[in-house]
Amino acid sequence: MSFISLLDTAAVNFFESIRSPFLIYFFKAVTTLGEWWFILIIVAIISFFFFRKLRMRPALILWLLTIGSAIDSYILKVLFHRERPIDSLVENGTFSFPSAHATLAMACYGFIIYLVLKNIRREWLRKIIAYLGPMSITLIAVSRLYLGAHYLSDVIAGLLLGGAWLAIGIYILKIVRR
């Protein structure tokens, strides 16, 4: 058994051992924040505010990240064809690797956090966003493990893929602002 398989198995066993009715309910609510349809709603709302202020570039880059990271995640799922853990507490229609929830959360929410931190002047609000934003991404990733929807390596790969898209988005935004 490989090292990654051992970590995946250990993570599945750990999260199964700490399941409780309250935490199942809590993480089912949290995992909704990473659903593709929920993220599309958030991206549409954020885009509306940018379009209203005639700032098209950040909104277009956010859409690029959303669509690009979703497509990449789907392609990798089809290529790797990895089955999900057996005792999942949520319905899943696709394969396991990588976690699309983690990918989209990191790419989209990460870029939104970046935009907010760049555009908000109130220090206390910046601190709240800087704390709660990454915590939300982390909770979405953990929710996928807690609910048995993914292996640890799926979630890590999703976060890395989303992080790559986030870096691309920030890079593009810096280039177009020059």
Image: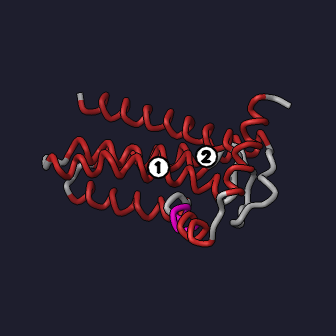
| Coordinates of residue 23 in the picture (x, y in percent) | 57, 66
Question: Could you tell me how far apart the alpha carbons at marks 2 and 1 are, in whole angstroms?
Answer: 19 Å
Q: Residue at x 78, y 53 (%)?
A: 85
Query: The C terminus lies in which quarter of the figure?
Result: top left
Q: Is residue 141 left or right of residue 1?
A: left
Furthest residue in direction right, as rendered = 1
Residue 57 seen in render: no
The number of callouts visible is 2
Prevalent SS, magenta region: helix
Image height check: is 156 above or below 35? above
| Residue under the image location 41 percent in, 44 percent down | 110
Horizontal side of 174 relative to 88 (left or right) equals left
Q: Nearer the viewer, residue 31 or 142?
A: 142
Location of mark 2 (residue): 71
**Which residue is identified by label 1?**
137
Q: Identify the image quadrant of residue 61.
A: top left
Q: Does the rendering let one see residue 131? A: yes
Q: x, y (%) of residue 82?
A: 79, 45
Residue shown at 19%/55% (left/top)?
53
Q: Say above or below: 30 vs 25.
A: above
Residue 19 point in image, percent of width and height: 66, 62
| 31 inside magenta stretch | yes
Q: Is residue 90 magenta?
A: no
- The kind of residue on which mark 2 rests is Ile
The magenta stretch spans which residues?
A: 28-32
- Residue for point 23% across, 41% down: 118
Tell me which amino acid carries mark 1.
Ile
Percent coordinates x, y for residue 7 in the rendering = 72, 37
Could you tell whether 119 is left or right of 68 in the image? left
